[in-house]
Image (cartoon, coloured by chain):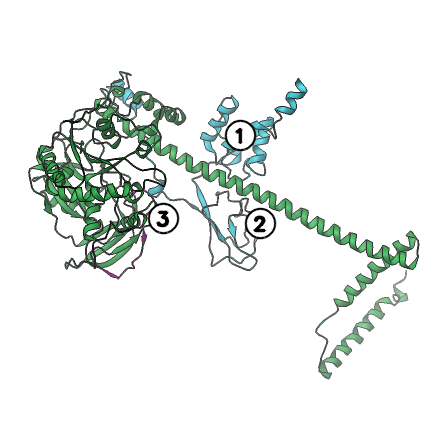
Amino acid sequence: MSRELFKFRGGVHPPEHKAESNGRPVHPAPLPKTLVIPLRQHIGTPAKPVVEVGERVLKGQLIGAADGYISCAVHASSSGIVTAIGPAAVPHVSGLPDDCITIETDGRDEWIAHAPLDWRAMEPADLRMRLRDMGIAGLGGAVFPSAVKLDPGAARHCPTLIVNGGECEPWITCDDLLMRTRADEILAGVAIMRHLLGSTEVLVGIEDNKPEAIAAMRDAAAGLDFPVEVVPVPAVYPGGGAKQMIETLTGRQVPSGKLSTDIGIQVFNVGTAHALARAVHHGEPLIARLVTVTGHVLRPQNFEVLIGTPMHALITLAGDREGATGVLMGGPMMGVPMPSLDVPVVKATNCILVKSAELFPPLPKALPCIRCTRCADACPAELQPQELFRFAKAGDFGRAQEYHLFDCIECGCCSYVCPSHIPLVDFYRYAKSEIWAREREKRAADLARERHEFRQFRLEREKKEKAEKLAAKAQAKRAEIAADATASGAPDAEAKKALIAAALARAQAKKAEAAPKNTDNLSPETQHEIEEIETRRAKIRELAHQPLEPEEKP
Amino acid sequence: MLGWSAIRFKVEGNPLAEKIDAILPQTQCGQCGFPGCRPYAEAIAKGEAEINQCPPGGEEGVKKLAELLGVEPKPLDEAHGAPKPKSVAFIDENTCIGCTLCIQACPVDAISGAAKQMHTILAAECTGCELCLPPCPVDCITMVPIPEDLPHWKWKHPVVMLKQLDREEAAT
């Protein structure tokens, strides 16, 4: 009995270009001389370095610890010496550097002591924290820390677990090859996910253009002690998107602004399941992954690559050719251009796609939007891309948000079908980052307002407290004098006089106190000197008081 | 009925001033000529101040105020200063003599220190108002522009400007 499948709205059929790279077996990439391991490879707080420059590290050793709940650790991919901790080039479209740990490898590839985890006996929370400390993050592209996704919450449980083998993006074949060659390990990881989430139904969605992967996964699933349904799904881009895969397999949509767990479904990429199995059954942290190197190279193929390997090494390995016009990390639809080839492979690197003028001819000039709404027909998130474009271009971000800009998954279908060749997704990315920046500014302004208001309040309070203190003091003094006066039976005027007298006495006492303080314990000579000076002073004073000489008179 | 409504729907403070205050950047720099953002907001609400006196808010801020108040936006008034890139104050701790004058000048209590103790800026709280610069007797405070880093990086407006292309088309 085959499962009833559903169709999500929109989608496109770009040329697949999978055959270029999926015919060759997976090769391990050689150990590079230098590994550059970024501390920010996942969504959330960057890892905190726990090693020092000059320290020798072993393969699989923790070098950056997870910092907070939504964070993930990073590990040394091979043994060697830490030569630098600080900003270095990372695979980000901006070309800005970020904090990395650089390791000069020693070629020995010496493992740190590691052992499998007894996952069935462990507390789920402990197991999740171990996974976080082993650096497990989603390998489908978003790199969200898996430990967080494996927490179904206190009250909730996740009845459906979907394993995503869609790989809908053209050119990329790393998940395909992983499923063909390591189906058993993927399903071993799925068993642990199922255990943590308490799922009763496990579905593996694989696009029907990967028959070998489907067969391998079915074979592996037959030998399991729990039911796993391997479902071929029609190859439509972006059918491998999490929300699209959910809709195809279950017919349910994730509501806007909600998570899939809110409707009882969790989705993991096959690569993540494999990494999880390596971590739990072998004690190996996430230090390597499969990467497709394809496009304008001599031998497009998949490599098993250590995290931190520079991209140019892989392109050389696959055979670089003249006429390359740029490199994308990811596929042609969602990939981002790389600022340089010195950047390392990170957990998110599923594909290195070398462009050339023949394979990726430059787009014709963009023309004005004619509001043909072809983009709206193609949009799998059921948005109105032409309206979002209009608002983003005009800087009307409030309206863009009203039109659910944040439901856009940046799949690129709209740009792909646009007859005017407008780079629509770039406009949405621009609008999203502007909105985030404004929210940051708003938070900073609110903080400043709060602090300023508190300061005003504090100054006011201090002033008031000072005034009150003075008033209380004066009051006490007055009461004291009045008490004295009444005790001596003097009338009001007398009391006032007494007050003045008291004030005078106080002033005199103060004056006396202000007399020179260094006149005690003087030697007889100094004392004598002082006396002499005093007499001279007295004389001068006397002279000054004497009347002037008579001859000066007229 | 009117009397009842006056009590039932009584509004604390000036709601318009609140809304204006929410738009102002809260730098508390006083470049507008008022002792802080809130007094400036109140002055605008009363019609005693122009909307183009806030350099940290920039043209963007003027536009937002104009939209809120239903008036035409104006160019920023140069007399109140020009907009600058966002910066935070930085104290050279070798030169600081611990006089506390900057602490008293800071409108958001973003400087920590005590008499004859070295002072330092709480960078996350500093609004970049520059009010601590003039009182410093040893000129040990400088304004450092905030560098662009990965978490604060923004996608730029796409370079394919449709209008430009239109003009090119027209030229050919």
> In this rendering, do the residues under marks 3 and 1 share a single chain?
no
For disc 3, the marked residue is A68
Judged left or right of residue A507, residue B45 is: left
Q: Label 1 amino acid?
A: Ile
- Residue count near mark 3 (Cα–Cα under 10 Å), binned few <14, some 14–19, many ≥20: few
- Which dot, 3 or 2, sits closer to the camera? 3
- Which dot, 3 or 1, sits closer to the camera? 3
Q: CA distance from mark 3 to mark 2?
A: 36 Å
x, y percentage for residue B83? 46, 36
Q: Which chain is green?
A: A
x, y percentage for residue B3? 68, 20
- Does any portion of residue A121 appear in the rendered image? yes
- Which dot, 2 or 1, sits closer to the camera? 1
Q: Which chain is cyan?
A: B
Indicate whether A195 appears above or below B15.
below
Question: Does dot 2 land on a helix, a strand or a loop?
Answer: helix
Judged left or right of residue A164, residue A457 is: right
Quadrant in which residue A111 is drawn: bottom left
- In which quadrant is the C terminus of chain A drawn? bottom right
For disc 1, the marked residue is B20
Q: CA distance from mark 3 to mark 1?
A: 37 Å
- Does any portion of residue A342 appear in the rendered image? no
Q: Label 3 amino acid?
A: Gly
x, y percentage for residue A378? 24, 22
Identified at 77% across, 78% down, the residue is A532
Answer yes or no: do the residues labelled 3 and 2 have beta carbons within 8 Å? no
For disc 2, the marked residue is B104
Q: Which residues are magenta?
A: A42-60
Magenta segment includes A58: yes
Q: Label 2 amino acid?
A: Gln
> In this rendering, do the residues under marks 2 and 1 share a single chain?
yes
